[in-house]
Image (cartoon, rainbow, N blue to C red):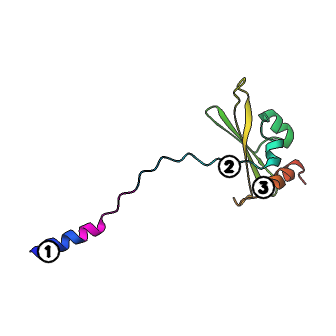
Amino acid sequence: MRRFILASTLILSACATAPQPQHEPQSPEITATPRTARIGLVGLTAQELVGHFGNPALQVREGTSLKLQFRGRSCVLDAYLYPSQNGGALRVTHIDTRAHSGADTDQAACISALETPS
């Protein structure tokens, strides 16, 4: 009986996990938008984007923010607009680009392709 208790204790202790160290929650990593996109698109209003690329293929409102999606033959551009601090007008704060497959694509090339559709 002693052997059974000892064996049970050893088996159960092997199943226990080591305590995980406590870490501060990490804030999401902020990645800089490439300079070409930042200069040309960040800060624009929705109307200015529509004037630049034409009507978006998709518009998504979430709370006070807006996502506009523009699609071309080779890529997709998502523009995220949030209220500005001075006056509350929605302005582009972030741009994402990708191929239709979801793979990463060069942001400057995608913007150029959307500006000059063939």
State the residue lying farthest toward the bottom. Answer: 3
**In the depicted structure, whether residue 13 falls above or below residue 86:** below
Q: Which mark is residue 75?
A: 3
Q: Nearer the viewer, mark 1 or mark 3?
A: 1
Image spot of residue 16 (x, y percent): 30, 64
Q: Is residue 90 above or below residue 107?
A: above
Assign a secondary structure to mark 2. loop
Badge 2 or badge 1: first in the primary sequence? 1
Could you tell me if the residues under marks 1 and 3 are in contact, i.e. CB atoms within 8 Å?
Answer: no
**Residue drawn at the location 47% of the way across and 47% of the way down:** 24
Q: Which is more toward the observer, 100 or 14?
A: 14
What percent of the width, then of the height, locates residue 79?
A: 73, 43
Q: Is residue 118 left or right of residue 110?
A: right
What residue is shown with label 1? 4
CA separation in Å, label 1 and label 3: 65 Å
Residue annotated with mark 2 = 31
Mark found first going from the N terminus, 2 or 3: 2
The amino acid sitting under disc 1 is Phe
> Would you say residue 14 sits in the magenta stretch?
yes
Could you tell me the amino acid type at mark 3? Cys
Q: Give the crowd class for mark 2: few <14, some 14-19, many >=20 residues within 10 Å.
A: few
- Disc 2 residue type? Thr
- Bounds of the magenta span? 11-20
Disc number for residue 89:
none
Verify whether residue 83 appears in magenta: no
Quarter occupied by residue 19: bottom left
